[in-house]
Image (cartoon, rainbow, N blue to C red):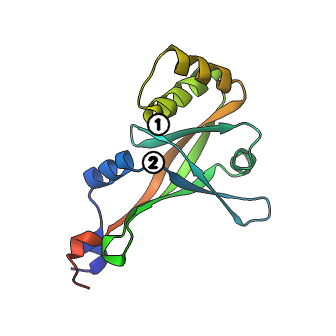
Amino acid sequence: MSRRALITMTPDEVAAFLEERRVVTVATVGRGGRPHLVPLWFAVEDGDLLAWTYRASQKVANLRRTPEATLQLEAGESYEELRGVTMECDVRLVEERAEVARIGGAVAARYAGQSGPELDAFVTAQAVKRVGLRFTPTSVVSWDHRKLAGAY
């Protein structure tokens, strides 16, 4: 068996990894063709990653031109602890205000650890100037070096 096969996460392991991570790095293609990297908070829904961001952001301008992104999440401090997931994704910009607020609410609740009228009021006010992002993976690559148990 190849080392690549040994360290690949199962779909359940990928799902658990996404739930435990807090920040995803998103790469879009800038106007000049170079990668534009940004960190985002996110929520997971039906295998997609959801985020929201300011309507006037560079990443939104990039996604309007090319609605594709590569996402990466990683963990580990030393080689034998490294694990991560990279996803190539099709991206849908969500502009309907109610859906933007729903996405923003899911993200905000995940990071606030709570919900309620104050959080709802914040999300509703922010939704006016934001768009939702729905990242749908078309390719997933994962690795978990802990599966090698120190044998390289």
**Which image quadrant for residue 34?**
bottom right
**Which image quadrant for residue 6?**
bottom left
Residue 114 vertical position relative to residue 111 in the rendered view, above or below = above
Quadrant (top left/top right/bottom left/bottom right) for the N terminus: bottom left
Q: Position of residue 77 (x, y in %)?
A: 39, 70
Q: Position of residue 89 (x, y in %)?
A: 52, 52
Instruction: Using residue 57 as the reference point, say whether residue 89 is left or right of it.
Output: left
Front residue of 63/41: it is 41
The extreme bottom residue here reads 152
Q: Position of residue 145 (x, y in %)?
A: 30, 72
User: Is the residue marked by circle 1 packed among few (<14), some (14-19), or many (20+) residues within 10 Å?
Assistant: few
Front residue of 77/147: it is 77
The Cα–Cα distance between marks 2 and 1, rounded to whole angstroms, is 8 Å
User: Is the residue marked by circle 2 packed among few (<14), some (14-19), or many (20+) residues within 10 Å?
Assistant: some
SS class, disc 2: loop
Q: Position of residue 12 (x, y in %)?
A: 26, 50
Front residue of 93/150: it is 150
Residue ID at (73%, 36%): 55
- Label 2 amino acid? Arg
Residue ID at (71%, 44%): 60
Quadrant (top left/top right/bottom left/bottom right) for the C terminus: bottom left
Residue ID at (26%, 80%): 2
What numbered label is drawn on residue 45?
none
- Label 1 amino acid? Tyr
Instruction: Using residue 124 as the reference point, say whether residue 5 is left or right of it.
Output: left
SS class, disc 1: helix
Label 1 near label 2: C-beta < 8 Å? yes
Instruction: Give the labeled residue for mark 2.
Output: 22
Instruction: Give the labeled residue for mark 1.
Output: 111
